[in-house]
Image: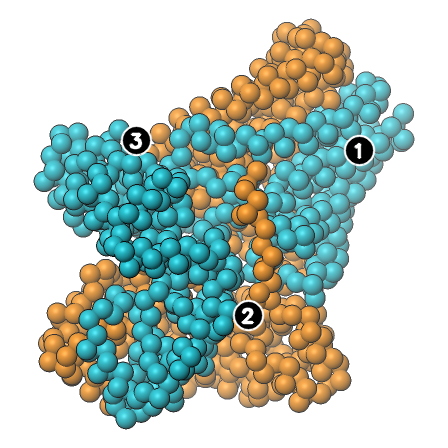
Chain colours: A cyan, B orange
Amino acid sequence: MAEPEEIIEPDDDAYAIDRGTMREVRDAVEAEDRDALLLAMEPMHPADVADLLEQLDEGPRHRLIALLGHDFDGEILSELDEGLREDVIEALSPAVLTEAVRGLNSDDVVDLLETLETPQQETILQALERPDRIAIERAMSFPEGSAGRLMQREVVTAPEHWTVGDAIDFMRASLDLPEQFYHIVLVDPRYQPIGQVTLGRVMSSDRVTKLKDLTEDSYRTIPATQDEEDVAYAFNQYHLISAPVVDDDGRLVGVITIDDAMIVLSQQNEEDLLLLAGVGDESIADRTLQIVRQRFPWLLVNLGTAILASMVIAQFEDVLAAIVALAVLMPIVASMGGNAGTQSMAVAVRALATRDLTGSNAWRVVRREVMAGFLNGAVFAIIIGIVGMIWFGNPMLGVVIAMAMIINLVVAGLAGVLLPILLDKAGVDPALASGTFVTTVTDVVGFFAFLGLAGLILL
Amino acid sequence: MAEPEEIIEPDDDAYAIDRGTMREVRDAVEAEDRDALLLAMEPMHPADVADLLEQLDEGPRHRLIALLGHDFDGEILSELDEGLREDVIEALSPAVLTEAVRGLNSDDVVDLLETLETPQQETILQALERPDRIAIERAMSFPEGSAGRLMQREVVTAPEHWTVGDAIDFMRASLDLPEQFYHIVLVDPRYQPIGQVTLGRVMSSDRVTKLKDLTEDSYRTIPATQDEEDVAYAFNQYHLISAPVVDDDGRLVGVITIDDAMIVLSQQNEEDLLLLAGVGDESIADRTLQIVRQRFPWLLVNLGTAILASMVIAQFEDVLAAIVALAVLMPIVASMGGNAGTQSMAVAVRALATRDLTGSNAWRVVRREVMAGFLNGAVFAIIIGIVGMIWFGNPMLGVVIAMAMIINLVVAGLAGVLLPILLDKAGVDPALASGTFVTTVTDVVGFFAFLGLAGLILL
């Protein structure tokens, strides 16, 4: 078991919306009291308002939005769970929607558009002013899930020959600097970035210092077509704060900041976790029918594999008819295999995601999993062998279940690590090697080994 | 199934160490060719070197470290997997270790110390200069996993009455500014932070502007004793870049930056994923005996629960002896329940981690899971009922398995969501509601419902 100090988190709800606020909001909505609503929501960050909307039922949610009126902040839309955006946008009046969308950064608008159906995309695009609309349409021309979609177009650049003084004067004179920026990107005459300087270094240097002499070592550019998950990995691996994005000709087209990368990272982790558990892109805000539809295909696959395992058992009906004790013990071997397989699979999937499992150590990892399966298998073989012997008073039954246990735990280790590696090699998300597939292998092998050995040895 | 475009990731190895470099490194280590080694490793970030060390076997790893000598960068230690740090530190000569540790930021040294045993902690502390040692010991006095351990002590502050000009002059005159910083923290005479100004705003404002007029809206302080997972949540939720850390008296003691928060977030996600799969804190670099020891307790718990399920089956030995077909179909009901339970559990665990599942919507979510279990249960009841009927030519057998399926999927939905919620309420990590516990419930209920109904209806 994990260490106790890792498990206890007394402070776990530090940033959750507290019940008091929640009640105030509900009461204000019920009473249609706009002032009380604004008062209760006043200290809330748009991200918290989004959480609030996700936690309300549809009726109160729509009444709250209507009551808020023009105080609906556009950023709430960006923070909102993807499954709920459509619903909330439909509840907004056209005037409120226009105002909300115009207040957003280009990358947030792109993110919003990506999750909407065409008619709603049109509504949003129409709400924008012409130059913004064109910029957004250009960003949307990059592939979905690429760095080009993730970046913001607002970048602070300086010619490579500028000094600290030039940069400060330029910034003082600029009227539309981005709200948040951390670097000045140096560009050559062809607008290709050649380095970047952190604002901290600019501020702590003399006016005559050349920006070129202050550039950061850890500087990296990101291709606009790169997968956003690779972008998130690079930010996490190299501790980047912001990085320039370049097109195929190496020209600067935008910048990605770490907060966007952090969102991608956390979405990707969510996806992996849900995928491993056999759920697609689901959220706690989804409605019953949505989750039924979402989970049905996975359960259908599982039904297929469960029937497969049953067909293996069916081959041994005569053995089972002769010794009913086998039916009692049979699930133990399968369950242990499923559990062990899930363990190696989770470690492998995670290691693939963090690039810690690669071609150069794959065989070592596979060998190690097989060895670990064998060792744990041997220990549990002894335990379950003794249990079986005592429970049913049949020593050979103990031997059979012990042998089946070793076989199944070795197979579990092998399947748990090989399935994700092979899926990854085939260009498929290794998290798809979800419980279902690994446990199919361990169920089939578990039943076959146990009942087969029983047929050979006990009959 | 998930949409195909989400699954295909052709560019997945964008930042993995390529085989060519790996071979060069191996060859250089084999040939003890220091120059070739330095050449091959020259473009590598310390994080990549850490990955490299993790992928090598113990022998080559130690030879590489010896060959590197004084070119061993201290940051490699911070980037290294926790399970491997001890091994690498032992392989370093005292002179190299001293040099490596002195180059690190205070937060990185703290992180390093946390993962080491006392004798190695002493070695590291002795390697530091006295003032650094005292600072580190002070940081170590905060609880493990708290903001106080995560923060760096190096902060750029300004008195609240300063102007932009004052700040720039001060920074130009400072010799030991932090390597990376994004804000100036304004403090009152008692050294309590009252706001912060981004460097971007400082740079774009006139020298006479008061810093107080430029403070950020989204400003938040973090208590030094706050759990690091809550810190990571706050950074992700409120898109913070850096935040001042305060002690119990509200006095500034340090600053946490988003890159540290991102590391915590990704560690936490890794922990959740592994915990759900019944693995503790394991890594791909662990040795066989480590992973055997790590996984054994979970498998032991699973053995206990599997035997429990077997004891349920044993109650129905006479029913099984009468109708062997029951033994064949029995695992299907249990497997479907386990799968459905894992689905609801994963969604619930994730929603608890992101504070989207709280007291205010818990009952709605539970009701929804039960409804979803019933609806999917009904559909699969029809399918499996027909399969059972046709396969064994016994209509009543079909009715029995159909009824058991509905019961088990409803229970699965309920257990999958209730177990994590109850664990969370009890102050335990809900991810502990791993497959093992939910599937115990669905196995027991599945076998009991199916065999019990069979006994009532078919005998």
**Mark identifier at residue A448:** 1
The residue tagged 3 is A57
Q: Who's the residue at 30% across and 31% down the image?
A: A57
Whether residue A382 is visible here, answered yes or no, is: no
Q: Is residue A144 above or below residue A388?
A: below
Q: Residues within 10 Å of mark 1 (few under 14, many from 20)?
A: many
Q: Who's the residue at 47% across and 64% down the image?
A: A224
Q: Who's the residue at 30% across and 78% down the image?
A: A199
Total labels: the figure holds 3
Query: Numbered disc 2: what chain?
Result: B
- Please, what secondary structure does the residue beneath circle 3 have? loop
Q: Are marks 3 and 1 on the same chain?
A: yes
- Amino acid type, mark 1: Phe
Q: Is residue A359 above or below residue A384?
A: below
Q: From the viewer's perspective, is the residue at label 3 or at label 1 nearer?
A: 3
Marks 2/3: CA–CA distance: 46 Å
